[in-house]
Image (cartoon, coloured by chain):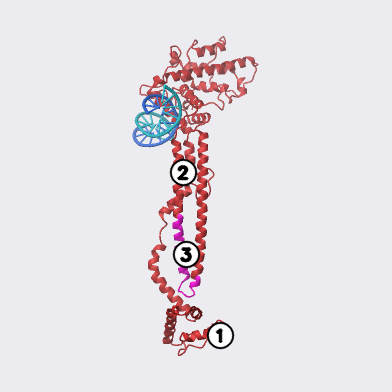
Chain colours: A red, B blue, C cyan
Amino acid sequence: MDEQARIMQALGGVSLAGHSVQGGMALPPPHGHDGSDGDGRKQDIGDILHQIMTITDQSLDEAQAKKHGLNCHRMKPALFSVLCEIKEKTGLSIRGAQEEDPPDPQLMRLDNMLLAEGVSGPEKGGGSAAAAAAAAAAGSPTDNSIEHSDYRAKLSQIRQIYHTELEKYEQACNEFTTHVMNLLREQSRTRPISPKEIERMVSIIHRKFSSIQMQLKQSTCEAVMILRSRFLDARRKRRNFSKQATEILNEYFYSHLSNPYPSEEAKEELAKKCSITVSQVSNWFGNKRIRYKKNIGKFQEEANLYAAKTAVTAAHAVAAAVQNSQTNSPTTPNSGFQMKDEEFQLDSAENKNTLLTNMFTGSSGSFNLPNSGDMFMSMQNLNGDSYQGAQVGANMQSQVDTLRHVISQTAGYNDALGGNSMYSPHGLNGNGGWQDATTPSSVISPTEGPGSVHSDTSN
DNA sequence: TCTTATGATTGAGC
DNA sequence: GCTCAATCATAAGA
């Protein structure tokens, strides 16, 4: 006797009529039932359930055979469907709520942060916004760039580790999901497992893995926070500006003492010259104004120093220019130089060199250093790299005229050079504010080259 | 180690 | 958004 048939008989006659079993063998119709009446069907189902319940009591071979027989039973799809439905209904009430969970706000925060820091998402060229912000606020640009690159390197490491781990998790998740799906599909032949349930199981697995991912994200965020805090702490680590930068700023400050409020352009120019940021220039002027105002006496010496420097620089520059103009042909065309103030004409009888020399020694009229600020910047340009060669041969008369204009503007401070002090503190009004804040302190420079710095008031 | 100098930050006022 | 004023924190010098 065939083994399968024997088993089927042993099972008490499972109704497998009309179904062929493996090997093409047709099984006999179920005894006592033709499947046409309702009682018969109930009996059928009862038999099948009974077989299912007792299947574990049998040997493996028997169970296998019975399983196969059940799989091929004509009632199997209907029974499977009913059991799935029952399972679905009992399970939904428990799982329904879980499935409609809103996105975890914590996870969203982590995702957003990782995205903002450039850890997740597309890699940002300059690292994070934090790095860029700190870069702008940090001290020396050189040091800062080192710190910045350090930050980027470390962030890049974190990013790499994060992505490697994430990839591992995703791979493990996919493998496990596939495995479970295969297992469930296999089991669905004997257990009431619907595709929907498989989907649900997959989503449960994904949830579990995403909770692991969240831990990874949490750790990554912590690492970024630590890195960031260290980096930003370094921002507070004050570094003094270079001596040259301080000199440039001081020169500007004391030469614009009547109105030490550099315009945006001037700030940018100063920032460029000092290799610092515009906000650092603003900070510096803010601090300087307040500290100067608080203790003018203390800054007197410094003011004198810079005033002297300004005068010497300007005198040398102008003297050189005058000499140059004298050696040039009088027919030298005015190339590029625009005289912007024609109000004053130099007395033709006056010796230009004498005028200039006297001007800075105080023997001829007055020289107000604070108000000569723009002149200083301009004169500096005569010696600076930015000075245009064509301007050397420019109309010297115009330059001297403009200088005279500068002198004329200082009429209110005639004693500036007369006393012991070269510099006389002024510009501050009785209320502690700078007077003439709106009075143009700058005389339009005769050599407004690319290197010149304008004051607020010149705008 | 203490003091001073100085760059940065913060909050209020405009 | 800029400036002032107060304050903090650190560098630099005595």
User: What residue did someone put label 3 on?
Assistant: A202
**The magenta stretch spans which residues?**
A185-213
Task: Tell me which amino acid carries mark 1.
Answer: Met
Q: Which callout, 3 or 2, points to the residue nearer the camera?
A: 2
Q: Mark 1 lies on which chain?
A: A
- Asked if A187 appears above or below A307 in the picture, the reply is below
Is A190 part of what is drawn in magenta?
yes
Residue that appears at 53% across and 20% down? A341
SS class of the residue under badge 2?
A: helix
C-alpha gap between disc 1 and disc 3: 39 Å
| Disc 1 secondary structure class | strand
For residue A291, side relative to residue A251 (left or right): left
Q: Mark 2 points at which residue?
A: A227
Q: Count neighbours of disc 3 (C-alpha within 10 A) and say few if under 14, some if 14 to 19, many if 20 or more.
A: some
Specify the subunit that label 2 lies on: A
The residue most toward the top is: A349
**Mark 1 vs 2, N-terminal side:** 1
Residue occupied by mark 1: A25
Q: What residue type is labelled 2?
A: Leu
Find residue A129 and report its horizontal and vertical position in percent: 48, 43
Residue A196 coordinates in the image, percent (x, y): 46, 69
Residues indicated by labels 1 and 2 sit on the same polypeptide chain? yes
Question: Predominant secondary structure in magenta?
Answer: helix
Name the residue nearer the viewer: A389 or A33. A33
